[in-house]
Image: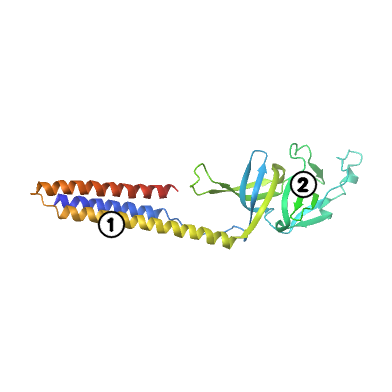
């Protein structure tokens, strides 16, 4: 009886492990997707590093982005003419950008941004160079504190490892440049990722089936073992070792999937 109970216990344990691995690791969020409907991707360089990004937004937008015309020969006002300079408001000379038309955005004084800030009417601005996809360039002013949000793509040291998307938020004064490499609809992104998820689910299903089949073979051989036949026992021993090696490989594959 004990010989028959052992594989059943193994089967029960492995079934529990399999259930936990394939069901417990599949976490599906039902929360509202806050990603933009158009995914602008490329690179961002701050004052520390350059990294690949997705979902680039400026002030929460990818179109209708307000920037302002530069003030020619602007100098910080003295106490004498402060009242006159304070009447010059860049927001009264506005331009509108659309990331569909933008190739890159660079901070003009990237090496000393704080020293180059322009303060007008108690608002701080930095100067940027915008290059459009047709090659034309134009300098603008934008608020130093204008927020740029994105998802940083961290692929990790293992080339097979799935990338981690880290939410980043930076003010314009902290950005040396933004390069727009392209864009795609969020539906296309979701479709691609869903295909990857489906493929991974098929692989897991194959391993689960192979593991269950191996356990069934072990149980069947234990049930049919004739204890009075020494040669049969040796064959059984050899067969069991082979099946256990196979089971170990399948469980290792399962663990590798859980790490990815």
Image point 68% across, 52% down: which residue?
180
Q: Mark 1 points at which residue?
A: 213
Q: Position of residue 155 (x, y in %)?
A: 54, 46
Q: How is the image coloured?
A: rainbow
Q: Which mark is residue 6?
A: none
User: What distance separates the C-alpha of mark 2 from that of mark 1?
Assistant: 64 Å
**What number of labels is visible?**
2
In the picture, measured across the screen, residue 8 lies left or right of residue 169, that is left
Q: Would residue 1 appear left or right of 194 to someone viewing this image?
A: left
Q: Do residues under tags 2 and 1 come within 8 Å of each other at their CB atoms?
A: no
Q: Quadrant of residue 223?
A: bottom left
Task: Determine which residue is flagged by label 2.
Answer: 128
- Label 1: few (<14), some (14–19) or many (≥20) C-alpha neighbours in 10 Å: few
Position in image of residue 209 (x %, y %): 32, 58
Percent across and percent down for residue 37 are 62, 61
- In the depicted view, which residue is nearer to us: 150 or 181? 181
- Of tags 2 and 1, the one toward the viewer is 1
Name which residue lies at 43% across and 47% down: 259
**Residue 22 on image: x %, y %:** 38, 55
Q: Is residue 128 left or right of residue 88?
A: left
**Looking at the image, is mark 2 or mark 1 earlier in the sequence?**
2
The answer to whether any part of residue 32 appears in the image is no
Query: Position of 3 compared to 203: left or right?
Result: left
Q: Which of 238 and 252 is in front in this view?
A: 238
Callout 2 environment at 10 Å: few (<14), some (14 to 19), or many (20+)? many
Q: Element at badge 2?
A: strand
Q: Is residue 245 visible?
A: yes
- Tell me the SS state at disc 1: helix
């Amino acid at each position: 009886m004990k010989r028959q109970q052992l594989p059943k216990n193994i089967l029960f344990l492995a079934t529990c492990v399999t259930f936990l691995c394939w069901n417990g690791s599949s976490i599906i969020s039902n929360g509202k997707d806050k990603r933009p409907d158009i995914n602008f991707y490329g690179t961002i360089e701050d004052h520390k590093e350059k990294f690949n990004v997705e979902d680039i937004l400026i002030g929460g937008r990818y179109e209708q982005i307000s920037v302002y015309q530069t003030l020619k020969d602007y100098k910080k006002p003295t106490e004498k003419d402060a009242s006159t300079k304070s009447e010059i408001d860049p927001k009264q000379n506005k331009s509108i950008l659309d990331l569909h038309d933008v190739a890159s955005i660079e901070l003009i004084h990237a090496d000393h941004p704080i020293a180059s800030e322009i303060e007008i009417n108690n608002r701080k601005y930095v100067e940027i160079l915008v290059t459009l996809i047709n090659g034309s360039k134009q300098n603008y002013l934008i608020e130093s504190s204008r927020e740029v949000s994105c998802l940083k793509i961290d692929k990790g040291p293992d080339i097979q490892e799935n990338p981690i998307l880290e939410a980043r938020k930076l003010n314009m004064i902290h950005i040396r440049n933004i390069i727009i490499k392209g864009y795609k609809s969020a539906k296309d992104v979701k479709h691609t990722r869903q295909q990857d998820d489906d493929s991974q689910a098929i692989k897991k299903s194959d391993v689960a089936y192979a593991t269950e089949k191996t356990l069934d073979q072990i149980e069947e051989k234990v049930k049919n073992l004739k204890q009075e036949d020494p040669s049969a026992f040796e064959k059984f021993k050899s067969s069991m070792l082979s099946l256990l090696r196979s089971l170990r490989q399948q469980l290792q594959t399962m663990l590798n999937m859980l790490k990815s």
